[in-house]
Amino acid sequence: MANPELVRPGVALRDDELRRIAERLGREPSVVELHAFDAQWSEHCSYKSSRHHLKRLPSEGADVVLGPGQDAGILHLGEHAGERYGVVVAHESHNHPSQVVPYEGAATGVGGIVRDVLCMGAEVIAVADALRFGKVDDPGSHARYVARSAVDGIGAYANAIGVPNLAGDVYFDAGFDDNCLVNVIALGIVKESEAIASYAPPGAGGWDLVLVGKSTDPSGFGGASFSSVPLDAGDEAANKGAVQVPDPFLKNVLMRASYRVFNLLHERGIAAAFKDLGAGGIMGCSAELAASGGYGADLNLDDVNVAVDGMAPEVIAVGEAQERLLWALPPEATADVLRIYNEEYSLPEIAHNARATVVGRLTAEKRYVLRYRGAVVMDVAVEFLTGSIRDELPYVEVIRHEPEGAELPAVDVERAFPRILAHPDVCSREPLYRHYDWVVRGTTAIARDAADAGMLVPVPGSPLAVTLSIAGNPRLGRIDARYAAERAVLDAVRRTVAVGARPIGLTDCLNFGNPRKAEQYGELVAAIDGLDRAARELGLAFVSGNVSLYNESSAGVAVPASAIVACVGALDDVSQAIVPGLKSAGSALLWIGSRELAVGGSVLADVLGIDGPLPSISYDAERAAIGIVAGAIAAGTLLSCRVVAEGGMLTALARLAFDARRAGRALGAELDFGNPLCEAGGFLCEVRDAPVVDVSGTLKVGTTIAEPRLIVNGTNFDVGQLYDVWSKPLAEIYP
Amino acid sequence: MSGAIAVLVFPGTNSENETLRLLRDCGGRAELVHWSRGETLGDFDAYVLPGGFAYEDRIRAGAISAHDRMMDFVIGGAQVGKLVMGVCNGAQILLEAGLVPGTGPIRRPAAAFTDNAPVPHFVCRHVYMKLAVAPARSPITAALPDEALIPSFAAHGQGRLAADAAQLDEIVAGDRLAFVYAHADGRLDDAAVPNGSALGCAGLINAAGNVLAIMPHPERDAWNFNHLDRRQGSDVLAPSGGSVLFASFVAAVDAR
């Protein structure tokens, strides 16, 4: 039992951690210090049970401009007019808030990830979302409410700030009934020479700390530990207090004002640091910004623009009110930056008491000091506050799939295929994403779900293009966390290749259960192993990521292991893109890549209620397939392409026919292949001249025809009817 | 000397950069005018109001912005014949300001672009706008062919024209229904309309023909890279598709 004096409601620090703090300080911590350590040493901020495993992941490579460690990573996109352009990418979860208050939780997820990209000095060019919801069949279920409201929140926020939704995926699985996953990704574009650090650079001693954005209010207090909140008014107020409140209208203006500040700093050649306020609020942001540059900080909480009077200092210090960022500025720049935010962009007129204001300064002495009403309310060694803490926890790895395979089942394709197309994990996502704006900014080349990856042309006047794809199949995750993580990398990379792009880097968000349960922790460790293996085999690095733990059902069962991976791709010229949809009759259909047939974890297995082994992964075959597809694109023989994933090769073919139908081309195909519903992997490609790509690892599986029919081993499907089957199911959830 | 076009930026506007870029790519002399320097608007020859959620769409989309002091210049300019075009949120603002359809007093709108139907929800969808007046009806449309089909994106939650029957009659009788939603082949039916808009209305014009309000965004389907499978010519960065309307607007401004 800890010293009862130290135990306070709403603080999630463990007894041993409390003792460690008191010993190091040589006294009992103040109330403000207690809450500061509670936030900073939370799993959310400290990665205390994952950081030592994450270190394994590859983080360097030719395309990496900035690896993990700051608010976002940067990848090299290409050059235009003598400038090197980088893509800024960040990836986070907002799972627990989205389960409790889905609209606000998901919206603030978008808001947070956008700030992570913005604060690198980048213009935000895209968002994306990976969603895992519970079973939504029951119209009155909380799971359906979450599935709808989270999508509304994501849409409303990104639409208002004017950032297109470029990519995403969604799965519905009872394993997420009590704990949805809302992962969000944002991309930005920046001249690599103009990226802004989120740590204090050399020579920053004495610089001003300028807080900018929304006035600090009591919302989001305790968000980092997401524990109950020490408010006197009881549970209702406590729950409200844990909710962060999104303000995309203010964010819209804040982003544009920040772009203006970036211009000013570049024009004058002024170095600065810029960082998002996330978990731990003002305290967490300023302490990390200072400590990572080797400085301390001294802040006066009385200078913080607050929304209401009488807020306790610990709430001002660690509350997580949204739409705030922190600049560290050399004093000669401060007045101009304040003028841009407060006058040119009139923040105080946009939202109540919103503004940019000086709240403190960086100090050479490595102490973290907070003052309030003339008194010092926090004074600790900054490295002790922000330094790495580590929990060594026991784990075991559990693999649930049957290693030796049952025979492939005989499948009645005529009956099974429409059921697969209507399956919630396969059917059209359009009813969902039509609520998102995916064309604002006018840069969209390939829209979300129009192909395996979305594509933008982000640099005005340049044909450089960037792509984004997402993968992470929970049906595989619930069988084998390691395998699912490897497949997430492979699937995301394949999706990038399928639109004609070159994969340049990865991000990951690891959504797992309780690290204090050895089996659930084992899944996390195994998944990191899987990510590591797959990324190294494909020569790619992770430049950004996030870990979300304690994702459990009310009965204490972990969500299906969910290592969700995003892949960023680049094209030197958007005209090299592979445009979606079958192009002409008489083309050959080739299946390129792994064709090991197995049903484990497939939609087919779900539809038929059967089980079986997982298809094995051969990295040699994967690399060869990627090379063949890239070669066919370079040779100009590849007309259209989709990866073989959920629903198997026949689903990939149907999607190519649907894409053509949407573009006004009535095309179909004759297919001659025995098991077109297995999810073995690889690419289904339409090629102009089959012999040109007649290489080992490819198999001709059919020919395109000039009528909208799919003829599969003698079974005849009408493309229009299949389209109806595929396009409608989610319309009930997303009217 | 070509005319100077102001692209207005209200707090909450979000489509100003692509609107500006397309006007410039169509040869226009355009610049952004931000709300904090709205007093410079009198110096411009034409105004474009871009998309977004100005003033957070409080009350109703466009309702607050119509009373912003920047609109004093736009209303005054429209009354002396300057060309004005509003896209999406810009169209909503022009309607709330009473400039289109122009059947009632200024800032006392008799019609509105309001909640989509049947589902009152934001929708993003590719659409075609079909020119429903003779091109010569307005200088802004003068360079378009008869019944021009303009590829665009509808991206709004409040795009349904709503007015009483007498107003709708006046809009039709007064030749103020500038654009209707259509299919790619030009057919008109309810399925082509993304929002339940009365008359299938995608755009309105005032009596004098110098103020055009369109709900869809042609500037989002306006360069070859926006529609790789419909591209015209080999330059993937060249304007095409929806850019024809902006090109016609720029030509009209420069002809003055």
Image (cartoon, coloured by chain):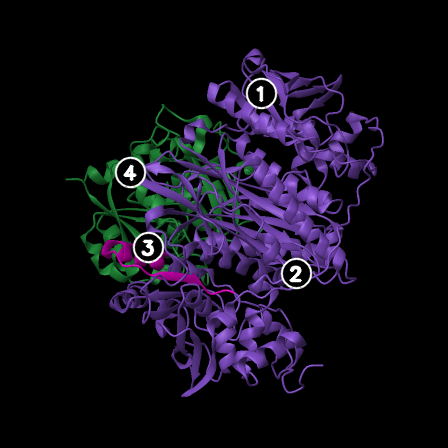
Chain colours: A purple, B green
The residue indicated by pointer 1 is: A686
Q: Let me know if residue B55 is in the magenta part.
A: no
Task: Point out residue B202 in the picture as x, y percentages from the top left corner.
Answer: 44, 42
| Circles 4 and 2: CB atoms closer than 8 Å | no
| CA distance for labels 3 and 4 | 31 Å
Nearer-N-terminus badge (4/2): 4
In magenta, the rendered stretch is A256-278
The residue indicated by pointer 4 is: A82
Task: Point out residue A98 in the picture as x, y percentages from the top left corner.
Answer: 62, 60
> Few, some or many C-alpha atoms within 10 Å of disc 1 (few <14, some 14-19, many ≥20)?
many
Report the amino acid beneath label 2: Gln
Q: Please give the chain letter of the residue carrying mark 3.
A: B
The residue indicated by pointer 3 is: B9
| Above-or-below relation of A134 to A485 | below
Q: Secondary structure at mark 3?
A: strand
* Label of residue A99 in the image: 2
Q: Can you tell which quarter of the image residue A260 is in?
A: bottom left
- Indicate the quadrant containing the N terminus of chain A: top left, top right, bottom left or bottom right: bottom right
| CA distance for labels 1 and 3 | 46 Å
Res A622 visible: yes
Report the amino acid beneath label 4: Gly
Residue occupying the far left of the picture: B1
Q: Secondary structure at mark 2?
A: helix
